[in-house]
Image: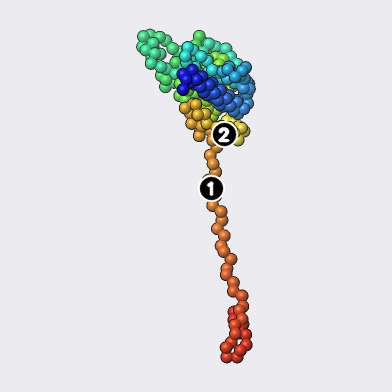
Amino acid sequence: MDLSLIVVLAIGVGIVSSLFSSSQLAGSWKAAARVLGVAYQKKNSLAPPRIEGSVDGLHLTIDVRSSGNSKATRYRVQYPSLDVDLQVTRKTGISRVSEFLGAQDAETGDGAFDEEFTVKTSDPDRLETVLTPTVREAVRELLVALPAAKITEDHIVFDRRTVERKPDRIVQTAQRLLAMGMVLAQGGQTPPRRSDSSHEALPPLPPDPFQPWDAQELLAEEPPAVEPPAVEPPAETFSPEEILDPETGEFVTVS
């Protein structure tokens, strides 16, 4: 086969593969946006997907960021400012080394919390009113589940170092961040949990053969098979029968 023809075919297959993958990605993000009750935005087929809108008074944005050859999905939840400079992150190896070298972090008075998380603020005296026990518990739950998340005085941001392709994962991550944002916006009041029945179910999507993810997580579980009730056959009945009596030469009825 001519080399130029092979090259053309390879390019064609690559284009078709890319378009199919892009279509699958758009379908996943649209499904997630629908469940979250916000808008799916995409300028054209080549533009990265974007989800944006208001959820319970908080502003949610989910988009794709590029840096060199790497891409990440960024989640951002904005809420009314707490009127104090604040940054809360989970401690890393680097932050612990900085602490060892003399870097000072603000303390909440909760020894276990201060050991696990880094708190920076311009007004340490206000930490007690901002990081209440309820807020600290919500922070702990979020940063244990999403260690790379960062909480500030007016937003939470979290980057996952991949382009999200599973709508259920997008929804779950966004809901975690929204729950934390609601606690902060309400001054430490725990928001009521939404009933699962109020969320629209994710539609099953066909698997993407060009991406290494398992679409089985998106498929609704089939209900268990129900055995049909056993039906007993009707009782056998016998109708009267007439036979010839050889002695009398007459027909006799036998039941």
Rendered location of residue 64, percent (x, y):
54, 17
Instruction: Give the farthest residue toward the front.
Output: 1
Circle 2 sits in a helix, a strand or a loop, which is it? loop
Residue that badge 2 annotates: 204
Rendered location of residue 21, percent (x, y):
54, 24
Residue that badge 1 annotates: 225
Rendered view: 81 above or below 27:
above
Rendered location of residue 217, percent (x, y):
51, 33
Rendered view: 16 above or below 97:
below
Which kind of residue does numbered mark 2 sit on? Pro
Mark 2 and mark 1 lie on one chain; the one further toward the N terminus is: 2
Query: What residue do we see at 42% from left, 22% from top?
Result: 112
The reply, left or right, for residue 31 in relation to residue 98 is right
Circle 1 sits in a helix, a strand or a loop, which is it? loop
| Crowding at mark 1 (Cα within 10 Å: few <14, some 14-19, many 20+) | few
Which kind of residue does numbered mark 1 sit on? Ala
Q: Is residue 149 visible?
A: no
Q: Please, which colouring scheme is shown? A: rainbow
| Crowding at mark 2 (Cα within 10 Å: few <14, some 14-19, many 20+) | some
Query: What residue do we see at 62% from left, 88% from top?
Result: 250
Q: Is residue 90 visible?
A: yes
Residue 201 vs residue 203, the one in the foreground: 203
Q: Which disc is residue 87 wearing?
A: none
